[in-house]
Structure formats: C-alpha cells, structure tokens
Amino acid sequence: MDSILSLILFPLFFALLIAFLNKKYAAGIALTGSGLSLFYFLYLLSGFKNSLKVLNEFSIPWIPGIEAELHFGLDSLSIFMLLLTCLVFPIGILASMKYEEHRSKSYYILLLIGLTALLGFFSAQNDITFYVFFELALIPFYFIILMYGGSNRKKAVFKFLMFTVFGSFLMLAAIIYFHSLTGINKTSDWAMLYDMEISLSAQTWILAGIFIAFAIKSPLFPFHTWQADLYSEGDRPTIIIIAAVLSKMGLFGLLRFFNVVDDAILHYQMPLIILCLIGIIYAALVAWRQSSMSRLLAYSSLSHMGMIAAGILTASISGLQGSIFQMLSHGIVAAGLFFIVDLIMFRTNNSSIYGSAGIASTQPKLATYFFLLCLASVGLPLTSGFIGEFDILLGLANTNIYLSAIAGLSLIFGAIYTLRFYQKSMFGEMIESNNEWAPITLNEDYVLIILVILVLAFGFFPSSWLDLADQATASFVHLKSKI
Amino acid sequence: MNPEILIHLIIWPTFIGFIINGLFGSMLSKTASGIIACAGPLIGFLATLYLYLTNPLLEAINYSYYNWFSIGLANPVNFSIYIDHLTILMLFIVTGVGTLIHVYSIGYMHEDKGFSRFFAYLNLFLFSMLLLITGSNLILLFAGWEGVGLCSFLLIGFWFKNPEYNKAARKAFVMNRIGDLGFILGIFLLAIKFNSVDIVKIQGSFANLSMNDPSIILITILLFIGVCGKSAQIPLFTWLPDAMAGPTPVSALIHAATMVTAGIYLVARMNILFSLAPFTLNVILFVGVATAIIAATIALKQNDIKKVLAYSTVSQLGYMASALGVAAYSTAIFHVMTHAFFKALLFLSAGSVIHGLHGEQDIKNMGGLKKKMFWTHLVFLIGTLAITGCPPFAGFFSKDEILSSVYSWNFWAFVGLSFASICTAWYMFRLYFSTFHGEFRGDKHVWNHVHESSWIMLFPLVVLAILSILGGFAGMPEILSERHFLHDFLKYNVVDHTHHVNHFFEYCLWSVTVLALAIIVWLTYNRYAKSSKEKFELEPTGFSKLFANKYYLDEIFANIFTNPLKRLGSWFKNTFDSKVIDILVQLPGNTLDKASIELKPIQSGNISWYIISILVGLIFFAILFLVKL
C-alpha cells in the first residue's frame, strides 16, 4: 500500500470514474481525485526518513530485450516536486470549475492523466522511466490546449509541441549514446548511472543533448519563444499547472542528470552560467515592457528559471540547495499569480494589465493576497522567494562575485516589473466597467489564503526543507566547495 | 523581569498591532485601532526603558528564537536578537519618536478612510525597523532593511488612486533595491571570507587583517552602496524628496527620523570593519560632504514646505555620513538622535500647518500663520533653531561635534560642511519667515478656516520641542563638561578614531556660528517676512534655476539609465524576440521546410526524368568505381 505506485495510479482511477459517470460529476471527481492525491502524498511524506536512500520504491521489469525497468521511488529531490505537483493540480482544477459548462469530461480525464504522468516523471528512478514519463506528460497537455483556450491556441500549442519534441529527441539520443558508451543495458537506478565513468568529450555530447532538451522545456533563454504565446493563448487553468509544474521539468532533469555529466558541467560552467545570466536580464527587461498579464508573467518566469539554472550550474552546495528550494517556491508563487490572472480575466475579459485598474479599493482581500505573492516573487526576506534566491546568489558569489552581481540585477529589475504590474492592475482610478465586479468567491479565497500561508511559512521556517534539499545535494559528488 | 520577556515586549507588540489592524481593522472603531497601534511602540519604549534601568548591559544580550536557515556556514542563520548599548540607544529613538508620531497620526489621519490600514503599515514598519536594529546577524538585519523599504513603499503610495504617488513609491523601492544589491553582495563576501554572518563573530575575526586590505575595501564599498540607497546619499537620494507624497507623519517617522538613518546605523554597527578601510572612509566623507552641499543648495529654492524639509533631511544625512567618514561613529549616532527629535518636530509641525490649511503645501500661499497657529509656530521655531545649530538647542551640540571632527581630519571637507550649514540656516529661516510671518498670501476663504490643530497633534509636538531643546546636553563638548554622556554610553560598542581639536578653534567656531546665524536671520527676515506672492512665482535664473531644478538629476538619471533600458526592453519585446531569436532557433526546422519545398519539383512523376536520373547516377558510380580501380 505504501508503494509509490499507488500514488501514481491514484489519479488514473479517478479518471476512469469520470469516464463512466455523468458529466456533471466530472469536475467534482477530478477535484476529489487530485485532492486525495495530495493527502496521500502527505501521508507518504510523513513516513519519509531524511536519508540518502530511495523509499517507497516500486520496480518491474519492462522491456526484456534491453533489460529496461520501470522504477519509481521517493527521494529527497523528488519530494519537492511531488509536493508541488500534488498541490497545484487541485488549484488548477478549482480554477477551471468556473468554466464548467464549457469543459467536457475529456478535459478532466486528460488533466488526471497529466497528473499521473508528472508524478511518474518526478519519482522516476532511472533514465528510461524518466524519459518515458517526460514524453507522456506532454500528451495530455497538448490535447487540452488544443481543445481549450484563446483563438490562436492551435498555432501556439503546435509550436510548443514541435519545440519540445525536438528537445526530446536530443535527449533520447543522449541517453542512447550514454548507454552505448557504458556498454551495459541494465538501468536499475540513478545511483548506478552516476557511478559510470565516462570521458569528458563523451560527457560534453551528452550534456549538449540534455541541456538543449531541458532548456527548451523550462524554458531557458534563447529557447523560450514558444512560451509567451502558449501562456497567453492556452486554457488559463491549465496554464497555472504548466507554469508552476511543467516549467520545472527541465530544471529537475538537469539536477537528475547532474552527476552523469558533472565533469562537463564544471568544464563548461562559465559559458553556460553566462547564458543563464543573459536570459535573466533579457527576460526581466522584456517583462518590464509587457502590457499583457500572461506575457508579463511568462517572461518573469523565464527570468526566474534562468536564475535557478544558474544556481544549479554553480555546482556549489548553496547554489544547488537554493535552486531546489526555489523550484518549489517559484511553483507556489507562479501558481498563485496565474490563478489571480485567471480570476481577473474571468471578470474583466481583458488580458491587459490596465484592465482591472483601481480594483484594490473594492477588493482589498484580493489586493492583499496578490501583493504578498508579488513580494515573494521579488524575493523579499521572510517570504519563500528570498531563501532560494539568496542561496543561489551566494553560490554564484562563491564562484565569482561578478556573476552574482549581474544575476543580482534581477533584484532590481524584478522589483521594477513586478511592482509596475501590481500597481497598474490594482491601483489607480477605478475603471467604470469594473464597478460591477463579482467579489472573489469562497473557493478563490481559500486557494489564495493557502498559497499565501505557504509562502510565508516557507519564508519564516524554511529550515527543514532546506535540510532536505541539502540531503538531495549530498548525493552530488563533485562539489567544489562547502558554501 | 528577565531580559527574555523584555525582548519579547520590545519586538512583538508592533507585529501584533500590525496583525490586528491589518486583518480586523475594518471591524474596529477608529479609537480602538489607534490605541492598539500606539500600544505597540509604547510597550516597546517602556520595555526598553525597563531593560536599560535594570540591566547594566555589561555584556550584550543575545537571544535566539529559532534556527531560520543554514547556508553551509559555520553557524546557522538564527532568528536572534542582539542588544547592546548602541541597540538600546536606537531602540529609544525608534520606539520613543515612533510612539509620539503614532499619537500624532491619530489626529492627522482621523478623516481618512484607510485609517486602520495606515496604522497597520505603520506598525509593520516599526516591527521591521526593530528587526533591523536588533538583528544579531546581517541577514536578519537585511530582512528588517528590506522590510522598512517595503513599508516605505506602502506608505508613500498610501493614497493609491493617484498615479504620481504610485510612481514615487515605486521609485523609492527600486532605488533602495539598487542599494540593497550592493549590501547583499557585501554580505556574501563577508560570509565567504569569514564563514559567518553573525555581526559579533565577524567583527571578532578582524584581528589579523591589515589596513586597506583590498577585500575589506570591496566589502565596505558594497555595504556603503546599501547605505547610499537607504540613507539617501549621492547618487541614490532622488527618491527621498519624491517620497513626500506619503502622509506627513510617514515623512516624519520613516523619511526623517528612523528609516533613513538605518544606513548610518549599519556603518556604526560595523565600525570595526569600516575602520580597517581608510580608503572607504574617505569615499564616505566625500560622498557625505557632497550630499550635504547639493541637498542644501536645492533646498534653498524649493517652495513646497515638505520638499524643503526633505532636502534638508538629505543634507543632514550627508552630515551624518561625513561624521562616519572621519570615523567619528558615535558623533554620527549623536546627530541621528538629535536629528530624529528636531526633524520629526519640523515635519509634524509642517503637517500641522498643512492640516490647518486643508492640504495646502506651497509656501507662496502661506504667510502670517503665527496669528492663528501659535503653538505650531512656536514649536516650528524651536525646530528651526535646533536644526540651524543655534546654541544651546540640540542640533548645536551634534553639529558642532561633527564640524570639529571633520576639521581635524580634512580642512576642505570642513569648509564644505560649513557652507552647507550656512545654506541650512538660510533655507530654514526662509521657510519659517515666509510661513509664519507677514501677511497671508493665499485665498481669503482659506484664511477664514485656518485653525490650530487638536491637542492630540500638539502634545507630541510639545514633547519633541522639549527634546529638541534639551537633547543636545547628552553630548556636551569637553570644554563645557568633563563627561560626554553619549560617548561614554556607546564606548563599549563603537570605537571612534577622532583627534582632539584645540579649544581655541572651538570657541572660534561657536562665535562664528552665532554671528552668522544672527546675520542670516536678519537678512531672511527682511527678504521673506514681507514677501509678496509674485516674488515666489518669479522664474529662477542662473544658479537658482539649477537649484530649483534639482541639478536636473532626475532628468540625467532618466536619460542615462531608465529611458535607454526601457527602449532596450521595448526593442527586445517587439523586435528582437520575434524577429531574431525566434527565427534563429527555428532556423533548422525552417531550412528543412524550405529545402523540401525546393526539392519537391524533382518528384514530378515524369518517368523519363526518373530514368535519366537513374542513368546519370549509374554512370557516376561506374566512373567512381573505375577510377578507384
């Protein structure tokens, strides 16, 4: 019962239920299913011992010809992303419920399949399983966006698909190359893969393959051009999930493969970090000039992803620890901000940041939640956003103080575009047509309260989670220094 | 009571006040919400007093709440409170002046719809400020540092319907963040070098460092960039005058008495570190003097009562920085204290004027207010005498100490500060005479409704006036008294490196001060007490124009930084992203696509074309085969 498999299959069971029951129950069942997944995960988490071992493992032989296994389990790295996944899905589904008449059963079935795929991806314990679920997760989201969203969604989602598939093939090639080098087919777990000795030149090729794949998926500059289109055209509740969880898949992959290609990462550290830094600043400048809420958040996300990637590439304890923590924090904050964008656009039907001006005077609660999430986004101390960014910048400073100074410019630009976004959309004189605003519903209130509490709780008491992140980095062998 | 309970009582009441007013403010009556808000700083003040009276503080108190996080350093970063003499003094200033301004605000904000929101922010500000001065490590100090910046943002933009105010709020936050980046980089370098972020532990490990060690210079310069942002030094001071968009009590509390002095406090806190870098001290001295002069000259030509006081604050902060620059740290803290008294007094009495004139801030529409606002006029005069350094008011002692310390270090810096002093006296008496003397220049209708403020606003003014008169006696120069109370108080925590100046110089300085003041009072009285409205509306020319337009610094910054970056961002957004990057990353795909279109005609279905192709191919390979043989 305590096997991770039950967590992964849990949403599928509810997807089946939806398939056989009346449409009017679909949303409720999806919400229950994802909510119960969250509770089930928390139950598994309560039994998790802070150790280097993989727990709640499950594995079965899969393809005998290449001795491939399907292998899942809980470890200190996967826990962060599993928590985020389980947390964000109910929020996305809650957000979608206000569009209930327009959503078919298949929408919720696809979402739950997506949940299963992501849970499988984050708990994958070898590269074949990792790859299969990496691909699998794409399919349900592709179909959802194809069916729901803005008028240009088809073009946007096709671009998304082509970019990602291109990256996936590079990753597949890299994985096959890796196995052909080591001469063994059997892939039981990550630890075994990490032990392989491969030459720097071979590592370089592998790094090139996976880095491009992950840079497209996150995305990182300059592979980001699919992102803003998708975020502004896609079905908004689904975008909450994509922005919060799917955007972490690439970075998570980089962490998973870190030990396979560590020599190459250290060798090409500087150019790669510089690429990330360019992305951080570039995205922040673009975000500053955006007037569409979704696009602004897309570029803000791009900037943050660059920061996290830079932290990973420092190959320092604080950089890695901070990146892992920041992935969780950014996921929570992004979910909250996209949730707010969705609820504003549901009411104003206007994607512009000016569309809801002045609303703070009639919706003080919303304005407060929004503000707190913005603070976490700009990394104010005692919110969750600070800890990760601080650690990452410290790791960068330890590599080279100038790198830290350049990445740190995002503290300034982040404040500029986030506060501009907040003030233009909440403050100022009220627009006439917004006098009739429906107050935020109880559901929306609960979601935002929970997110805000999490943001503050992780900001005030990050310690145990940082220890967990520390545990995750402890398995990374080639760390240069102790900071 | 043991110290732990007192620490709780100092830190948390303001936070609780923030929570109550923030969450349930709309359900509370104005009286209740005001009392709750005032209770926070008042309890803090009383607890500080009790702690001071019962605890000799021979050893600093260090109390840790919990482990905040660990960053791979030798010691984890704790949420812990550190109290020594320097902290106690700052606590007195912050909670004392804070209480008075809270009380005043009850009267000032009474008509405002956002009454409880205002007090929630104000309490949050005080909580952050308390964290800033009591944090035992640099990261907690930084948390308070950013927290006060946040509250400053919230309070400048308190009337959030006005886009101009929002812009001022954003400007303040962003310019502070520029400083904060320097600050945090300094923290990183300290953490890497000393493997700790604990203030006491870091300063204990300097013993084997040489003077002007390059790494120490870099660290101190980075920290000073943070100071420039928060304490409004050149070039990061332009946000402070704009910050006057906030309600006047905010200007008094945050933008004069407490928050802006946080940078001065930081340097005093890290004085051992800064003393190791004479190079940085010289930079600080230079920046401080330049700030004092530039801000004072701008203040000469401002017509908005709050703007004059704002530039005056910048100028006074320049004095404090100059004192830091000559390693006279406790002198700087002394001026922080006296300045808190008289500048809070000036701002609050200016607020009383604005309140009495129903929102009028332009001095060209004032004049003759002495007749209707006796008490406000009296305390404003006391504040003016204090800030201009008239003996024996509070400003005299601290300013005199700064001037003589600077004199013993660098003559030209002394000359610069003296010049700024003259400007200070000029713009303050100009302000005083044109506001309270002569005839009222504004609307008749307004004049009929001018009223003195209520006792709840006047009471804090009177207390601050008394402090502005007596506050200076805490630090009497050695020719008057053997005991310099403040230096003795701070000597365990702050090590000054000042030289003594001879007594003859002191006497000269005093006589010249008094003489110069007398002349300036006479000149400004003649010039401004009976000034007409037209005179205020004259277009300034020459230097006056430069001063009135703030040396065009806002325009210069906009043209050097903001506008180019904005244009770059727009170009990235509109052109580069879609026309360059998108095309480039899609190049492989598009090339294939194009190639397939180009090659498509080959598959024409024409049999004879296929046969010719096959033959050509065969012949080619046959030749290849033969050549190889």
Image (spheres, rainbow, N blue to C red):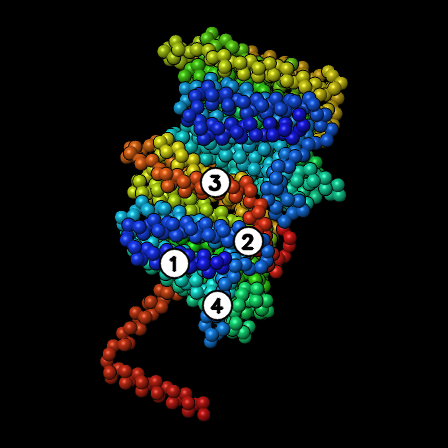
Which quadrant holds residue A462?
top right
Which amino acid type is marked by label 2? Phe
Q: Tell me the residue at 67%/42% (across/down).
A: B216
The verdict on a common chain for dots 3 and 1 is: yes
Against B49, is A222 above or below? below
Whole-number angstrom distance, CA of label 3 to CA of label 1 = 30 Å
Q: Say which element carries label 2.
A: loop
Which amino acid type is marked by label 4? Ile
Give the residue pinned by disc 2. Answer: A48
Against B541, is B202 above or below? below
Give the number of the disc on residue B311. Answer: none
Which amino acid type is marked by label 1? Leu
Mark 2 or 4 closer to N-term?
Answer: 2
Whole-number angstrom distance, CA of label 4 to CA of label 3 = 40 Å
Mark 4 or 3 closer to N-term?
Answer: 4
Q: Say which element carries label 4.
A: strand
Disc 1: CA contacts within 10 A as few (<14), some (14-19) or many (>=20): many
Whole-number angstrom distance, CA of label 2 to CA of label 4 = 22 Å
In the displayed structure image, the side of residue B49 where residue B593 appears, left or right: left
The verdict on a common chain for dots 2 and 4 is: yes
**In this view, the mark in front (4 or 3):** 4
Give the residue pinned by disc 1. Answer: A12
Q: Say which element carries label 1.
A: helix
**In this view, the mark in front (3 or 1):** 1
